[in-house]
Image: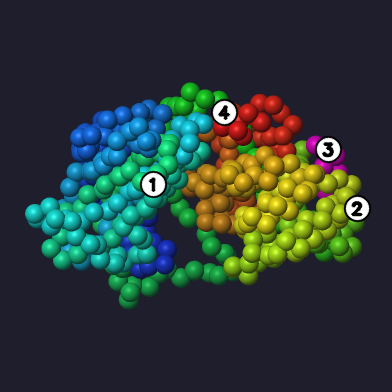
């Protein structure tokens, strides 16, 4: 297996991809953006003369590699503009810019930056981009966050366009920092609509998206070279959604996931949809109580009925009385059928509004809110989400390659809450889950319960940062 450098890996990322979702386009060519990851400081980028300390290249701002760009917003600092070198473009062709954004420093107030795709003519005059062949906007506001996430912007080169630049600007009145790294510019091509895709057997389900072995090797080498970025191995919460009785018992796929966790001696959390316990479910309840009492599984509250119609969810858009009843009924069922109250919560579809926060605040048993709103925590310990570091990509499809990519960009983070849906995992997807867990074990990660972030002082401190 060929080992790639970080820069080689970046170029391969630009070329990788196949079809883009929702559009018949593919990556045609990678444009040679100079110094896309700021490994050589600001070489290849132009900084506005008055930027001062508002723009810095720092090791702690890196998403991949050794350095990244940190831009700082504050009343005492100048507004800034950072502009890439020019890349030649062809009018009528579509261009996509991918980059990673987040960070901003531990404990820092989140800042914002505007990242733009700018087309110019031969005289340097800015031109309005045309609509691209895929659904993306030419600019995006990004904010400093606990985790790095991948962002995409772009557009189609209009008539008379000769060049494209990436521009980063001060955005918003707030203070704080945001880190940016690993820029990649691609020219897209239209796929021949007459070319039919390879036939797919619907009964087999959607396959796990492939990952280029050389690229995976590069990410793993990047991780091995600096596993924790000066920190400690990550704490891991395994958040498995949608457990409910199956003909009164437990579906074999859930049993398999629980047995695997026991075999690997790791903690996992299984989210129960409570309504199923209204029916006769003695085998299910006995199985849950046995594993709860053994202390290896945390069973958490994942809604009463997991209802939703695309806009109105169980805990988003529903009136107070509805949401309150769903919490009360679920806790009563848990106490009656299982012998304990739920102490951790994760909303169905991860959708929760201000009414949900009010209802949750009124339940004294619930202590932890996974994927909650850190700005409105409802008196709970909120565990944030990394969209780039997850068991599944896309949802339901466990994906080791996608996980390693996101982990490589976010290694050094104190904790990750990893969501999955075992009921949707056939053998191939379960194998991906196994590979992810074994990778994390090799990284010396500690698997913990969501509720441990309340009972353990060290984890309480981590959640505050």
Instruction: Give the CA separation, mark 2 to mark 3.
Output: 19 Å
Q: Earlier in the sequence, mark 4 or mark 3?
A: 4
Q: Residues within 10 Å of mark 4 (few under 14, many from 20)?
A: many
- Note whether residue 89 is visible: no
Please say if 133 is above or below 255. Answer: below
Determine whether the residue tagged by mark 1 lies in a helix, strand or loop: loop
Q: Earlier in the sequence, mark 1 or mark 2?
A: 1
Q: Which-is-in-front pick, marks 2 and 3? A: 2
The single residue placed furthest to the front in the displayed view is: 75
Determine whether the residue tagged by mark 2 lies in a helix, strand or loop: helix
Instruction: Tell me the residue at 89%/62% (across/down).
Output: 280
Q: Earlier in the sequence, mark 1 or mark 3?
A: 1
**On residue 233, which mark appears?**
4
- In the figure, residue 236 lies in which quadrant? top right
Q: Earlier in the sequence, mark 4 or mark 2?
A: 4
Instruction: Give the CA separation, mark 4 to mark 1.
Output: 35 Å
Instruction: Give the CA separation, mark 1 to mark 3.
Output: 51 Å
Q: Which residue is mark 2?
A: 336
Please check the rendered image and state whether residue 292 is part of the magenta-colored stretch, yes or no.
yes
Instruction: Tell me the residue at 27%/58% (across/down).
Output: 95
Q: Residues within 10 Å of mark 1 (few under 14, many from 20)?
A: few
Which residues fall within the magenta stretch? 288-295
* Percent coordinates x, y for residue 160 in the rendering: 13, 63
Q: Which-is-in-front pick, marks 1 and 3? A: 1
Question: Do labels 4 and 2 touch, CB within 8 Å?
Answer: no
Instruction: Give the CA separation, mark 4 to mark 2.
Output: 39 Å
Q: Main secondary structure of the magenta part?
A: helix
């Amino acid at each position: 297996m060929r080992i790639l450098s970080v820069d080689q890996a970046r170029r391969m990322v630009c070329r990788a991809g196949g079809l883009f979702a929702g559009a018949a386009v593919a990556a045609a060519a990678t444009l040679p953006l100079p110094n896309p990851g700021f490994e050589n400081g600001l070489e290849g980028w132009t900084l506005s003369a008055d930027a001062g300390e508002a723009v810095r290249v720092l090791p702690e701002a890196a998403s991949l590699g050794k350095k990244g760009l940190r831009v700082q917003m504050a009343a005492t600092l100048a507004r800034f503009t950072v502009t890439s070198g020019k890349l030649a473009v062809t009018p009528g062709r579509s261009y996509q810019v991918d980059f990673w954004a987040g960070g901003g420093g531990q404990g820092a107030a989140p800042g914002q930056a505007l990242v733009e795709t700018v087309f110019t003519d031969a005289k340097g005059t800015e031109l309005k981009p045309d609509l691209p062949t895929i659904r993306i906007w030419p600019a995006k506001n990004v904010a400093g966050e606990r985790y790095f996430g991948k962002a995409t912007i772009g557009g189609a080169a209009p008539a008379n366009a000769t060049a494209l630049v990436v521009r980063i600007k001060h955005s918003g009145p707030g203070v704080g920092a945001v880190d940016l790294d690993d820029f990649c510019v691609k020219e897209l091509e239209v796929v021949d609509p007459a070319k039919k895709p390879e036939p797919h057997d619907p009964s087999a389900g959607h396959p796990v998206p492939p990952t280029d072995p050389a690229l995976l090797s590069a990410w793993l080498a990047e991780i091995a070279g600096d596993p924790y970025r000066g920190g400690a191995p990550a704490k891991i919460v395994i958040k498995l959604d949608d457990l409910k009785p199956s003909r009164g018992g437990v579906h074999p796929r859930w049993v398999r996931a629980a047995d695997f966790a026991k075999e690997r001696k790791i903690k996992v959390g299984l989210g129960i949809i409570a309504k199923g316990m209204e029916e006769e479910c003695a085998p299910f309840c006995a199985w849950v109580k046995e594993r709860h009492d053994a202390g290896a599984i945390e069973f958490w509250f994942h809604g009463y009925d997991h209802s939703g119609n695309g806009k109105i969810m169980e805990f988003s858009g529903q009136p107070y009385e509805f949401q309150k009843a769903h919490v009360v009924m679920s806790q009563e069922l848990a106490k009656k059928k299982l012998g304990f109250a739920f102490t951790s919560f994760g909303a169905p579809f991860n959708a929760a509004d201000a009414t949900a926060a009010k209802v949750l605040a009124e339940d004294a048993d619930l202590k932890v809110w996974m994927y909650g709103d850190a700005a409105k925590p409802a008196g709970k310990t909120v565990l944030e989400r990394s969209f780039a570091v997850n068991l599944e990509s896309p949802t339901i499809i466990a994906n080791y390659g996608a996980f390693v990519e996101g982990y490589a960009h976010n290694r050094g983070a104190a904790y990750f809450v990893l969501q999955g849906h075992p009921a949707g995992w056939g053998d191939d997807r379960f194998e991906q889950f196994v590979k992810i867990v074994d990778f994390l074990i090799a990284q010396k990660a500690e698997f913990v319960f969501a509720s441990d972030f309340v009972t353990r002082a060290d984890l309480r401190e981590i959640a505050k940062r």
